[in-house]
Image: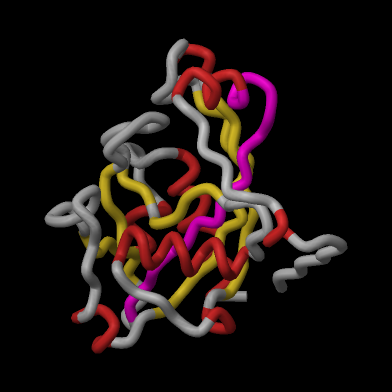
């Protein structure tokens, strides 16, 4: 279940952008909230692609990204789906199942070795065959998407520990 408790009007606050130096200072002092989405097909395979930037550059990962000020989890997940995969869905189809705390050893911004920390509110979404055909990944994911068996990821010795745990948690959910 997602709960958003809002006591103010986020629309009153203008969007904020930071250059890399400012953002690096922010990363040194706060934890970033992310809305990540496990995309599944009806056979239970997971859609993954290698990350194109730090942290975990080159590691197979799921769709998602940072939340923006004022967004609900569903809004952030849908925005990330639209940006990365070219689709939007009914927010009620996005089902939460796990929260993961990632402490990264590296990051894209200098000093890279300072790393960063993200909390991922992770949801799942099962796509229909028509939605799968309609996927239009952005340039970051174009040509790199792969469908992988959930059990394969859960028992992997080479995938990122966070993706292995995510796959295990989904398998437990499906068999509960």
Count of picture labels? 0
- In this view, the residue in front, 42 or 129, is 129
Left or right: where 158 falls relative to 17: left
Measured along the vertical axis of the image, is residue 92 above or below residue 31? Answer: below
Residue found 56% across the figure and 58% down from its top: 122
In the orientation shown, which residue stands out farthest toward the left? 143
Q: Quadrant of residue 108?
A: top left
Residue found 21% across the figure and 58% down from its top: 145
Residue found 61% across the figure and 55% down from its top: 121
Measured along the vertical axis of the image, is residue 58 above or below residue 74? Answer: above
Q: Quadrant of the C terminus?
A: bottom right
Question: x, y (%) of residue 87?
Answer: 34, 74
What is the image's colouring? secondary structure
Q: Quadrant of residue 54?
A: top left
Q: Quadrant of residue 48?
A: bottom left
Q: Inspect the magenta stretch and tell me whether residue 28 lies in it.
A: yes
Left or right: where 115 falls relative to 54: right
Measured along the vertical axis of the image, is residue 50 above or below residue 8? Answer: above
Q: Inspect the magenta stretch and tell me whether residue 60 lies in it.
A: no
Is residue 171 visible to the viewer in this orientation of the structure? no
Question: x, y (%) of residue 112?
Answer: 43, 15
Q: Quadrant of the N terminus?
A: bottom right
Question: x, y (%) of residue 141?
Answer: 23, 53
Is residue 39 visible to the viewer in this orientation of the structure? yes
Question: x, y (%) of residue 160?
Answer: 40, 39
Q: Which residues are magenta?
A: 26-41
Residue found 71% across the figure and 70% down from its top: 2
């Amino acid at each position: 279940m997602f709960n958003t408790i809002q006591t103010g009007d986020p629309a009153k606050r203008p969007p904020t952008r930071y250059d890399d130096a400012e953002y690096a200072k922010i990363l040194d002092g706060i934890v970033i909230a992310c809305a990540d989405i496990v995309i599944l097909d009806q056979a239970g395979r997971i859609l993954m692609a290698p990350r194109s930037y730090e942290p975990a550059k080159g590691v197979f990962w799921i769709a998602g990204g940072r939340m923006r000020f004022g967004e609900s989890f569903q809004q952030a997940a849908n925005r990330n789906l639209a940006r990365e995969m070219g689709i939007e869905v009914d927010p009620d189809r996005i089902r939460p199942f796990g929260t993961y705390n990632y402490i990264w050893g590296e990051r894209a911004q200098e000093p890279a070795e300072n790393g960063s920390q993200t909390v991922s509110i992770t949801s799942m979404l099962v796509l229909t065959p028509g939605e799968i055909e309609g996927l239009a990944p952005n340039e970051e994911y174009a040509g790199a998407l792969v469908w992988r068996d959930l059990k394969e990821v859960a028992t992997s010795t080479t995938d990122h520990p966070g993706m292995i745990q995510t796959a295990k948690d989904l398998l437990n959910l499906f068999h509960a």
